[in-house]
Amino acid sequence: MMSDWPERLNRFVEALRTGHRPPTGLAQTPEEIDDLRMAAKLAGVRPGFDEPDPAFLQGLREQIGAVQRTDQQRITRSRLLRVAGIWVAGVAGGLGLDRAWQGFHAPPPAPAGTFTLSGGRWYPVAQLADLTAGVAKPVDAGAVPAFVLRTGDSARAMSRVCTHMGCLLQFDAGESEFQCPCHGAVFDLNGKPDPGYDVLSLPSLPPLMTRVVNGTVYVLGA
Amino acid sequence: MNSPQGVPLTRGSEAIKHATDPATQAAVSEAFEQYATPIYRFAYRRLGNHESAQDVTAQVFLKAARGLDPSFGDEARRAWLFRVARTAIVDVWRSYGECPVVPLEWYAEEPTRAVLADAAAPAQVERVLAQLNPVQRKVLELRFLEGRSLIETAQELGTTEGNVKVIQHRALRRAAELDLGKG
């Protein structure tokens, strides 16, 4: 057992106490793992502490809906591609044709059987330091296209798929808004549709769960 | 893209059909409302912190959105959800240690037994604490049950923070031995 184990063990205990994810790779022996397990067990029986935050549950509910909608929109995009290949060039914009093509045709993660691919996963999408407040960065959280935005020392993300017909939105820095190249829908940086363009009263862009760990922004995708 | 190379498109199309199938969506919504909280508790009991419990819960239901079979009955659905949760919990535990020896059985129990074990856990912890010496017990109570900081605990005991870390380590070591029946 290494002599600094009480110190490393305390880092684990502090994480549990404050509700955070403990650092990985702390333990080096089976005894040390036993100590960690005992600590987790003690923290796990704290009365009233095992209830999920309602805001977390609501966020996850929306996230599940976003995944389902994304799948639906992928079908729409594929069909559009087949009938109007030229449309790709317009949508691809700065992305480049290859990338766009892959994006539209890449299969979603495999169904049951391959856990890491079909489950929700945190995808590193950006460095917080590279993000500028008010400037949305287009990213892909696995198969989920997203915009990520800086908010002070944190970040937030939302779906990059237009809620009208499933085209990929583009960020307009001058207007500070998201624009759809297909039919002109416009969303503000909170994902709310601009009523001026919104003849069909479109749904907002679903927010995606976001975390910042050691300066890296992660978005929960699939 | 993180999608696997070479996966046939038909397979992808099946997944799409599956996730957008109204029966699947209804099953996932129902499963979420019924089991999100139990799954969260299951994870929290085994991981001891909210962020990790959130990660596991999110993984379970995002996987369900794609892979849950709507034809499952209640029991099969519950077993499926808990099985996914267990795998995710074991993965978290694997990340904590460089050594491969993770006591899987404790995290990989059959759900009904696990829920019973969870119900018994507070009494079990109390029994373990009762067998520690008074200073060790006090440190664990302050740190874990009352959630006090290192400084507060040191002040309460009239000692240094460094000493609290040492006592905390010995107390956890002893408690782990007692809990595993090695004491």
Image (tube, coloured by chain):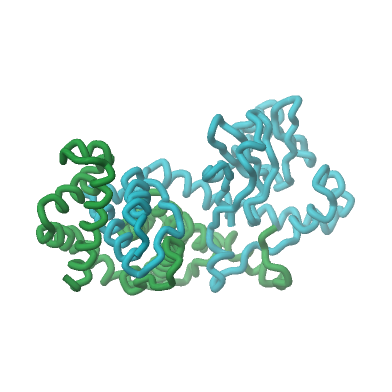
Q: Is residue B76 left or right of residue A189?
A: left
- At 19% from the left and 40% from the top, the residue drawn is B159
Q: Is residue B7 left or right of residue B150?
A: right
Chain B hue?
green
Q: Residue furthest right?
A: A86
- At 34% from the left and 68% from the top, the residue drawn is B107
Chain A hue?
cyan
Q: Is residue B86 left or right of residue B62?
A: left
Q: Quadrant of the C terminus of chain A?
A: bottom right
- At 13% from the left and 58% from the top, the residue drawn is B132
Residue B171's spot in the image, x, y percent?
21, 57
> In the depicted view, which residue is nearer to us: B11 or A106?
A106
> In the depicted view, which residue is nearer to us: A23 or A183?
A23
Q: Is residue A78 above or below residue A173?
A: below
The total number of labels drawn is 0
Q: Quadrant of the N terminus of chain A?
A: bottom left
- At 51% from the left and 62% from the top, the residue drawn is B63
Q: Is residue B98 above or below residue A197?
A: below
Q: Residue furthest front?
A: A3
Residue A27's spot in the image, x, y percent?
40, 62
> In the depicted view, which residue is nearer to us: A12 or A184?
A12
> In the depicted view, which residue is nearer to us: A110 or B182?
B182
Q: Is residue A70 visible?
A: no
Q: Is residue B100 visible?
A: yes
Residue B35's spot in the image, x, y percent?
37, 58
Q: Quadrant of residue B86?
A: bottom left
Q: Is residue A64 above or below residue A133?
A: below
Residue B51's spot in the image, x, y percent?
41, 49
Q: Is residue A69 above or below residue B153?
A: below
